[in-house]
Amino acid sequence: MLHLKCDTPQRWLAQVDADLPSILIDHAHCEKKAAGTAVQLLFRYPQHAELLAPLSKLAREELVHFEQLLALLAERGLRFSRHRPSPYAGRLRERERTGEPERLQDTLLCCALIEARSCERFGLLAEAAEDPALAGFYRRLLDAEARHHGIYLSLAHSLAPQAEVEARLRELAEHEAAVLAEARFSGHLHSGMH
Ligand SMILES: [Fe+2]
Ligand SMILES: [Fe+2]
């Protein structure tokens, strides 16, 4: 359902356990970035009326998630601060084509895959969390990010024939799996696995 080409292995969780504060701080940055990416699309494509309301709503939801993370960090005595971003999204988006409408289609599909990976990892984090409040938090986010995955995918489908979108999604999902396979664990939500 999430169209991912690889599963995050359980050993990734062991590395998260070793540095949960970094994961939480990075997660706050990811929610802010997700809102920013959706807003950037509103600026880049004002002529695409079908994108505007769904992406505006999605950006607001990501900012609510960001605020929830800020509260969670404060509860745990962790300080939100400048942070070196994970290379994941940049590496994934290197494959975006440059001409239109391919660029927009690829951006929407890359965003769909990033949402899918977040959703998959929140599922693992929810299962592993010893703190029931944290587990519940991840479960709620998981539902939202699964929905965002669907929104980005349906926007991509509204712009091109179904077979073309599905083929490109498969290619980008293979690339996403390769990006993670090459990356090391780094205290980021979208870090590699070794
Ligand atoms: Fe989010
Ligand atoms: Fe999201």
Image (spheres, rainbow, N blue to C red):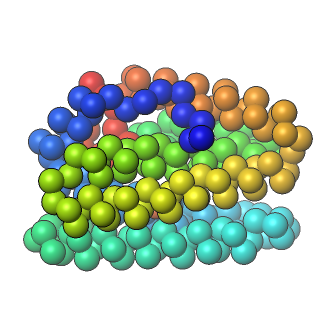
Q: State whether residue 141 is above or below residue 72.
A: above
| Residue pictured at 58% horizontal, 58% vertical | 148
Residue placed most toward the observer, 94 or 153: 153
Residue placed most toward the observer, 52 or 17: 17
Residue 178 seen in this snapshot: yes
Relative to 166, 71 lies left or right: left
Residue placed most toward the observer, 41 or 77: 77
| Residue pictured at 33% horizontal, 74% vertical | 68
Q: State whether residue 182 is above or below residue 172.
A: above
Expressed as whole percent of the image width and height from the top left, the position of residue 20 reads 17, 51
Expressed as whole percent of the image width and height from the top left, the position of residue 55 reads 66, 68
**Image-quadrant location for residue 161:** top right
Q: How many labels does the image show?
A: 0
Relative to 174, 27 lies left or right: left
Extreme residue in the right direction = 161
Relative to 90, 104 lies left or right: right
Q: State whether residue 37 is above or below residue 77.
A: above
Relative to 168, 164 lies left or right: right
Residue 43 seen in this snapshot: no
Expressed as whole percent of the image width and height from the top left, the position of residue 194 reads 27, 25
| Residue pictured at 36% horizontal, 50% vertical | 122
Expressed as whole percent of the image width and height from the top left, the position of residue 70 reads 28, 73
| Residue pictured at 67% horizontal, 27% vertical | 171
Q: Where, quadrant-wise, is the N terminus in this rendering?
A: top right
